[in-house]
Amino acid sequence: MDDERFWSVIEPGCRDEDPKNHLRSALQKLTAEELVEFQERFDAAFEKAYRWPLWAAASVICGGPTDDGFTHFRYGLILRGRKIYEAALRDPDSLAYSSVVPDPDAGYLALDAYEAKTGGDMPRRHASAMREPEGSRWDLEDATQTKRRLPKLVAKHRGS
């Protein structure tokens, strides 16, 4: 499954109030091998979003996410589709114009669909290595620096 196909599975529901329901339905239509390939693409997108600037954006939007909170935020970001996802990677402040709802389950939808289809666990071909998020980290308690780096998000979510 290439990137175009991956995003074409997500895109039709990305503007829904709950895009996870659309994705769950779309995944049920894929073959077992396509589900494995989808999960690999999902995992790659998830890892690519492991960046300090996005963590800072998630902190502004969600009020200081934990490790789990940032995981759920990245799941929700992917559910919003390619355009919002790629814009956020380039400029996390662009999320001031979007609504990303953290989702604790989205990273498991293909795994669940695979199990329902085959009765077994999905083979995982790629293991993620623990690493530090990419990019520059700053003290999120430093309101001046956060406002300078994410002015639109701070204005929208903190009113300053």
Image: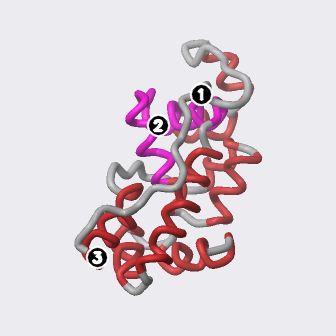
Q: In terms of secondary structure, what is the magenta stretch mainly?
A: helix
Find out whether residue 70 is within the magenta segment: yes
What's drawn in magenta, residue-wise? 51-76
Distance between the alpha carbons at the discs numbered 1 and 3: 33 Å
Quadrant where the image shows the C terminus: top right
Q: Residue at x 63, y 56 (%)?
A: 85
Q: Earlier in the sequence, mark 3 or mark 2?
A: 2
- For disc 3, the marked residue is 118
On the rendered structure, is 126 left or right of 101? right
Front of the two marks 1 and 2: 1
Q: Which residue is mark 1?
A: 131
Q: Quadrant of residue 29?
A: bottom left
- Amino acid type of the residue tagged 2 in the rendering: Phe
Lateral position of residue 103 relative to residue 42, left or right? left
Quadrant (top left, top right, bottom left, bottom right) of the N terminus: bottom right
Q: Which residue is mark 2?
A: 70
Q: Position of residue 132 (x, y in %)?
A: 61, 25
Helix, strand or loop for disc 3: helix
Q: Amino acid at mark 1?
A: Arg
Give 42 or 77, whichever is nearer the viewer.
Answer: 42
